[in-house]
Image (tube, rainbow, N blue to C red):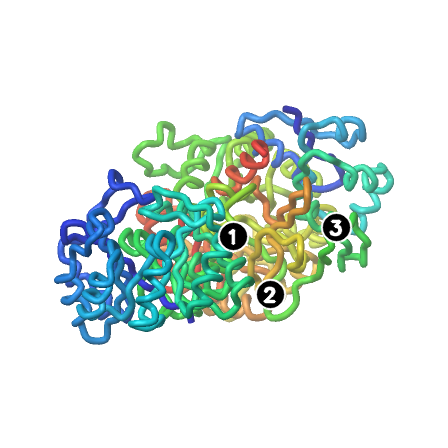
Amino acid sequence: MEIVVIKYNAGNIGSVANALDRLGQACTVTDDPDEIRRADKVIFPGVGEASSTMKYLKDKGLDKIIPALKQPVLGICLGMQLMCSWSEEGDTPALGIFPEKVKLFRGSIKVPHMGWNSIRFNPDGLYKGLQPGCYVYFVHSYFAETGDATLATCDYGTPFSAALHRDNFYAVQFHPEKSGEVGQLILRNFIEL
Amino acid sequence: MIEIIPAIDLIDGKCVRLSGGKFDTMKIYSDKPADLARQFRDQGVNYLHIVDLDGARTGKPAHIGLLKEIAAISGMKVDFGGGIRSRESFKTVLDAGADRVSIGSLAVTRPYELEEWLSDFGADRVILGVDVKNEKVAYHGWQSESAISWQEFIGYWLGKGINRTFCTDVDRDGTLNGPAVDLYRRIIRQFPGIDLIASGGVSGPEDIELLEQAGLKGVIVGKAIYEGRLSVSYPLLPKEGAGGGTWAGGLAKRIIPCLDIRDGRTVKGVNFVDVRDAGDPVELAIRYAEEGADELVFLDITATIDGRKTFPLLVKRIAKVLNIPFTVGGGISTFEDAVILLEAGADKISLNSAAVKTPDIIDRLARSFGNQFVVLAIDAKEVLGWEVYVHGGRIPTGKDLFEWAREGQERGCGEILFTSMNHDGTKNGFANEALARLSEMLTIPIIASGGAGKPEHFRDAFIKGKADAALAASVFHFGDIPIPELKRYLYNQGITVRIK
């Protein structure tokens, strides 16, 4: 099976490749549209800033390619936020795969939301075999609201979408590649989808 | 609030559990079910769900004596089921003191008989058990599947006045795989007035919360209680404990072991019994991750420039094997140094002397790679005020800790790692006052460092010091405080921690 990790100007794409490698799964890191379209599965990772990243995606034509993909796609962190309809970060219209909007954490909480937090989910699909309320690693200052595409939730001052899902598009706000055994199980479930 | 209803399943007068309804999976939880019921009562339980499995098998209630004993316990109500197939059995169970009779198979196989009893004894003396398998109602200990959908079945009996219903997704019962929340949501959506009790699949407090949110009135729990995953007094636990801890999770306080590296090897001996090479940072990193460390910090204390060149190679090896986040620091003096470590796979870098010398490096790194990438490490000593030191605590800078920390935040660092030189190495606890002041004045997370000697010190750093994370080296390396024990201790103190 061919997994492609979309390469763009974001940090720590290598850690996703490392995590797949630990599961014995090879991957190709690329921004080549043909390679992305041809892959069996696509991972859209990312740490970075929304508006500059959207601009990069547009320059590469990836803003058209990603929403049109038919194979399973997994967005991670900024990848997930850019799959939403809009981000408050830089007032950025995003890919619109999910209807949810992305907003900045506000109130008397520390930002970024950094560290391990527990998530609620139905134990099937990507979450098959996970213990209820298990902990995963988050690092983010913006969050996707809960809505129709919400598949898992987390609380940090406010409930927010820890995961989204629509058709072949999956996305997680946390970092499965840094979330210990729990994260590895989620990635394995994605590989085995 | 959702009511927790312990299940007492009886075989040969003992409280047992079967997994998936199969007799060959039997586990005995108590020889004295009445004593168990009293214990539950003392813990605040006032309703029990008793299932006479012998009766279910033979077709005649076998434990009426036990029912009488348990129903006589003051403050305790019970429902009782299993083998109720005649009007006589039904009446015997009510006479023995049951609040309700639980009826399952009979409602499927002989509905007209049940209807008669409802008019004789009242629909409020029945609790309807609905076992769902593939959307259909199952019966006879789940061995038979009917052609009746749960919608038809529940709708029919609601129409006859039975409002209290417990529902089991047959494939989930006793498996700790999580309750059938989806099914329950659909039932409640279809029958909004129903008094629905969940049964099966509960593995812990998170499930209870999910069920409560889904609108269930109660939940029958067996295995999770008997195997210690759920306390029956769960709703009585404080939602907000000391230090903001909650049973239902929330952002966990982080425990961070720190490893000093010289020439690619860990400096201090590390006291893990089964580690082959205590000097190999990679092997230790994996071990710490397995023990439940939330993050790791690697500090390069190599003295020579040549020796430093090997550090990125080590970082690369760590990044390949480690599945939790890690920070690297020590000897980062330029923007380019940090980029090399980022590319090697570090999640974060910690800046110390270099940031004091050229504060602009914080801004540049944060702008390029995000705030989360930059940890500002500050060593400070309190004499009159708190003064910042650099170069391993050898050189005073004249800078004030709090002003420098605020400047760091404004420049874009994502966290402050504050080491108190007064406390470091003393094993007498962290600098909680200074920590609390930092935590209150800043909006970014604070990592406490210096002074850890006992589990209580970590608790104090989180509660009094309001720290978001605590870092230590020797207490972990020498095995004085095993991380799983530390986490368990903090959990019991009401602090939110990630327990593996």
Q: Are marks 1 and 3 on the same chain?
A: yes
Identify the mark at residue A116; answer none if there is no mark. 1
Give neighbour class at mark 3: few <14, some 14-19, many 20+ (Cα, 10 Å).
Answer: some
What amino acid type is highlighted by mark number 2? Thr
For marks 3 and 2, the one nearer the N-term is 3
Question: Which residue is painted at 18% across and 65% down in the image?
Answer: B92
What amino acid type is highlighted by mark number 1? Trp
Which chain does the residue under circle 2 lie in? A
Report the front residue among A170 and B394: A170
Identify the mark at residue A49; answer none if there is no mark. 3
What amino acid type is highlighted by mark number 3? Glu
Give neighbour class at mark 1: few <14, some 14-19, many 20+ (Cα, 10 Å).
Answer: many
Q: Judge whether B146 appears above or below B92 on screen.
A: above
Nearer to us of marks 2 and 1 is: 2
For marks 1 and 3, the one nearer the N-term is 3
Is residue B409 visible in the rendered image? The answer is: yes
Which chain does the residue under circle 3 lie in? A
SS under mark 1: strand
Locate the N terminus of chain B and report the quarter of the image it occupies.
bottom left
Residue for badge 2: A158
Question: Which residue is painted at 20% across and 48% down in the image?
Answer: B58
Give neighbour class at mark 2: few <14, some 14-19, many 20+ (Cα, 10 Å).
Answer: few
For marks 2 and 1, the one nearer the N-term is 1
Nearer to us of marks 3 and 2 is: 2
Question: Which residue is painted at 25% across and 60% down in the image?
Answer: B50
User: Percent position (x, y) of residue B319?
Assistant: 56, 34
* B475 sits to left or right of B256: left
Question: Which residue is painted at 46% across and 67% down in the image?
Answer: B159
User: Percent position (x, y) of residue B109?
Assistant: 36, 52
SS under mark 2: strand
Q: Are marks 3 and 2 on the same chain?
A: yes
